Image: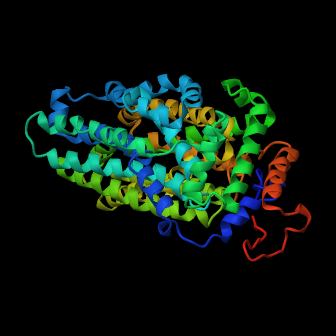
């Protein structure tokens, strides 16, 4: 594979090999099962809330009651109404890393739920980090991938509620969905107290005993003598100590070394890619797109909106299940190439459909093509930019800079989202189908950037990836700490088996 290469940090992935020996599924482990069930409504519920809020403005624009109440806004005014949510989110980003590292993932989460517009990025950063840092290594990629998928659950709820209130003739048709926005947050605030704190954060606060207890409880079902937990804790503690020696835990660390600059470049580009790949057209301006091909019926738009949300959930879930089977770079390249293909054919169909509307002779085939490619967009986008986004961010950033790194991603994602959400209605109004060509051009650039710059991170634990771009000697120190705990020599760990632990070489 050209350009970025694979996740070969040169050190022995002992923990990964130990994890692969564990054949007991998560649902057969009561403590781990409880943890995952609590993470779903709380941490993953953050993206549900985000999906609900984002879909709300799309669904409300379809309601005639909303259009009449706000004077049927168009162009720039419509853009700023939709983009104001992202603008509020941008304002909170400079403070996220500082607050998360001082008060912990859990403490910041509780506070942030009371300030949705200002707090949603803080919640996303803390929740995605908490999921990645609490999950058992075997399920971690799937759990962090499902984090983004829960966005579509919120989309479905918002779309379905607006579809149900579509028949209400007065202003309650749009006020009821708006009021219901508070419900997910109330559920999350009520349940977050049952979720443990990140063991990695506890280590940084000299609470190693508490961190070990959490690992033993959820990764070994309460067995404090577990060889795996002892090894995992040793690797975690050593890696974090090395990271803290090299880091000031500040924004400047993101640009301090060549490795950190590489991470920052990949992060800011991924933030742009998640919002500049044409997804905001469908997410916020589906009504306008359907108007452009002559489909103006409110009930038809609402049904398409609900169907897209459901289809996204199916595609996102399936893509999340694939993260254990396929390498990250392969999935991102398949995603970007598929998106470009979809957008090229969608642009062609849109041109023909609009031509039919202008001549008064509807082009049924082109209209069907537009709808087909709107739906085809979902599996293409979900394959990479939904399923892998937070999995990848958690993997490429070491603990000391993880909060700042994900906040950096959020910054560029929110800026890109604000820009595209504001500009989209202006572009559609002024140049029509030609506006889609701009996305085709940017998607071509995305393919090139992913090929040359995205590193491979598949098949390693977070600590094994902590020094992905740094000196191999640092990674070896963490390996030596693990070897001391499990009593193995580094020189003969390629094929040895024992009654307790069978060690196999991981093929990256």
Left or right: residue 64 versus residue 100 is left
For residue 147, above or below residue 193 = below
Residue 230 percent coordinates (x, y): 70, 55
| Residue at screen point 40% across, 62% down | 314
Q: Looking at the image, can residue 168 be seen? A: yes
Left or right: residue 41 versus residue 105 is left
| Residue at screen point 79% across, 38% down | 242
Left or right: residue 169 versus residue 351 is left
Left or right: residue 452 versus residue 28 is right
Residue 49 percent coordinates (x, y): 36, 41
For residue 177, above or below residue 501 = above
- Image quadrant containing the C terminus: bottom right
User: For residue 117, which quarter of the picture?
Assistant: top left
| Residue at screen point 77% across, 61% down | 14
What is the count of numbered marks? Answer: 0
User: For residue 334, which quarter of the picture?
Assistant: bottom right
Instruction: Spot the residue most to the right.
Output: 491
Residue 139 percent coordinates (x, y): 56, 60
Residue 176 percent coordinates (x, y): 17, 38
User: For residue 89, which quarter of the picture?
Assistant: top left
Q: Looking at the image, can residue 351 be seen? A: no
| Residue at screen point 63% across, 37% down | 207
For residue 395, above or below residue 320 = above
Is residue 345 or residue 76 the one in the foreground?
Answer: 76
Instruction: Spot the residue most to the left.
Output: 169
């Amino acid at each position: 594979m050209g350009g970025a290469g694979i996740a070969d940090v040169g050190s022995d992935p002992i923990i990964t090999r130990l994890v692969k020996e564990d054949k007991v599924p998560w649902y057969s482990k009561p403590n781990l099962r409880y943890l995952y069930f609590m993470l779903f409504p709380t941490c993953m519920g953050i993206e549900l809330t985000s999906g609900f809020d984002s879909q709300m403005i799309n669904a409300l624009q379809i309601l005639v009651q909303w259009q009449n109440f706000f004077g049927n806004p168009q162009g720039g005014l419509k853009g700023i109404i939709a983009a104001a949510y992202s603008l509020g989110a941008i304002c909170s980003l400079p403070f996220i890393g500082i607050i998360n590292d001082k008060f912990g993932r859990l403490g910041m989460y509780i506070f942030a739920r009371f300030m949705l517009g200002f707090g949603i990025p803080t919640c996303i950063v803390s929740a995605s980090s908490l999921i990645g840092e609490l999950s058992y290594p075997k399920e971690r990629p799937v759990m962090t991938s499902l984090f983004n998928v829960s966005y579509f659950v919120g989309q479905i709820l918002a779309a379905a509620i607006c579809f149900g209130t579509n028949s209400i003739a007065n202003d309650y048709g749009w006020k009821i969905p708006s009021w219901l926005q508070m419900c997910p947050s109330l559920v999350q605030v009520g349940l977050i107290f049952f979720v443990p704190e990140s063991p990695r954060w506890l280590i940084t606060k000299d609470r190693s005993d508490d961190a070990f207890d959490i690992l033993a409880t959820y990764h070994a079902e309460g067995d404090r003598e577990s060889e795996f937990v002892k090894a995992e804790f040793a690797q975690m503690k050593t890696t974090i100590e090395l990271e803290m020696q090299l880091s000031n835990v500040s924004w400047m660390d993101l640009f301090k070394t060549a490795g950190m600059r590489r991470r920052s470049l990949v992060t800011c580009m991924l933030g742009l890619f998640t919002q500049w790949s044409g997804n905001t057209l469908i997410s916020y301006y589906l009504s306008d797109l359907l108007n452009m091909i002559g489909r103006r019926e409110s009930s038809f738009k609402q049904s398409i909106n609900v169907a897209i949300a459901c289809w996204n959930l199916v595609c996102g879930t399936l893509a999340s299940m694939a993260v254990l089977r396929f390498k990250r770079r392969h999935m991102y390249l398949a995603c970007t190439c598929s998106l470009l293909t979809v957008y090229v054919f969608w642009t062609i169909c849109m041109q023909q459909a609009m031509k039919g509307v202008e001549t008064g002779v509807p082009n049924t085939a082109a209209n069907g093509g537009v709808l087909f490619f709107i739906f085809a967009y979902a599996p293409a986008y979900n394959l990479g930019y939904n399923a892998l986004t937070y999995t990848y961010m958690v993997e490429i950033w070491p603990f000391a800079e993880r909060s700042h790194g994900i906040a950096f991603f959020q910054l560029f994602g929110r800026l890109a989202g604000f820009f595209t959400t504001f500009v989209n209605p202006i572009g559609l109004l002024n140049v029509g189908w030609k506006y889609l060509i701009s996305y085709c051009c940017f998607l071509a650039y995305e393919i090139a950037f992913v090929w040359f710059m995205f590193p491979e991170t598949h098949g390693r634990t977070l600590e094994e990836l902590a020094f992905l771009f740094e000196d191999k000697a640092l990674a070896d120190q963490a390996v030596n700490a693990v070897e001391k705990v499990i009593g193995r020599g580094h020189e003969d760990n390629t094929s040895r088996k024992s009654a307790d632990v069978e060690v196999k070489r991981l093929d990256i």
